Amino acid sequence: YNRAGKTTTMRRIAEMVDATWVDFGDLVRVAQSADHTLPADTSRAFIQLRRRVGGDIVACWAADHLARGKRDRLVMCGVRDLVSFRSLSHAYPNLQTIAVLAGQQTRFARAERVDKGVDRAAFEQRDRVHSEWGLGHILDVAQWKISNNGDIDDLYHSVELAVHHIDA
């Protein structure tokens, strides 16, 4: 429950550029449903999958979705670790990266609206884990950064600007 707005953003981008959209977390949840030995937490489950399959598991998922899709563009949402990011960058040299940024207070307030029982300590711990995985580096090197501390109209305006520059 990061709540930066990346899913909303990436779905919008996929619509605008006629791309197949896939959520990183959904891919992990599919693997979890097929393998009940994986932990319930998607972050921990992904780490186990990456250890079993290899560091390029996300690039393999991307290639699989592109091969099965009717479009030649893929928008993948939620890649949070540096190993997966580097693997994708190597497999797809024309990769465009978009970081959706929102402050921790904004994200926590959004998480509370969705789940009144959200635990602040657990929320902050998840942020620390993602930081250890290299999320900060991914956000730093993204070609496009979209701030999402405002409302949905502000977000969509920022998305339109980013897509205009990407497709230019």
Image (cartoon, grey):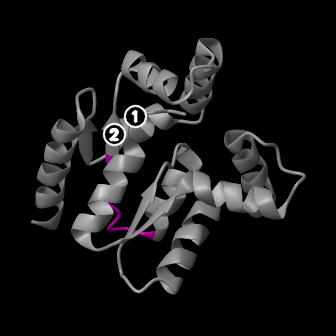
**Residue 149 x, y percent position in the rendering:** 27, 26
The overriding secondary structure of the stretch rendered in magenta is loop
Q: Secondary structure at mark 1?
A: loop
Q: Which residue is mark 2?
A: 100
Question: Which image quadrant for residue 21?
Answer: bottom left
**Residue 120 x, y percent position in the rendering:** 58, 14
Q: Which residue is mark 1?
A: 4
Q: Is residue 94 found left or right of 38 in the rendered image?
A: left
* Amino acid type assigned to the residue bearing label 1 in the image: Ala
Residue numbers of the magenta segment: 92-98
* Amino acid type assigned to the residue bearing label 2 in the image: Val
Question: Vertically, is 104 above or below 55?
Answer: above
State if disc 2 and disc 1 touch (CB < 8 Å). Answer: yes
Q: How many marks?
A: 2
Q: Secondary structure at mark 2?
A: strand
Q: In front here: 116 or 14?
A: 116
| Mark whose residue sits in front, 1 or 2 | 1
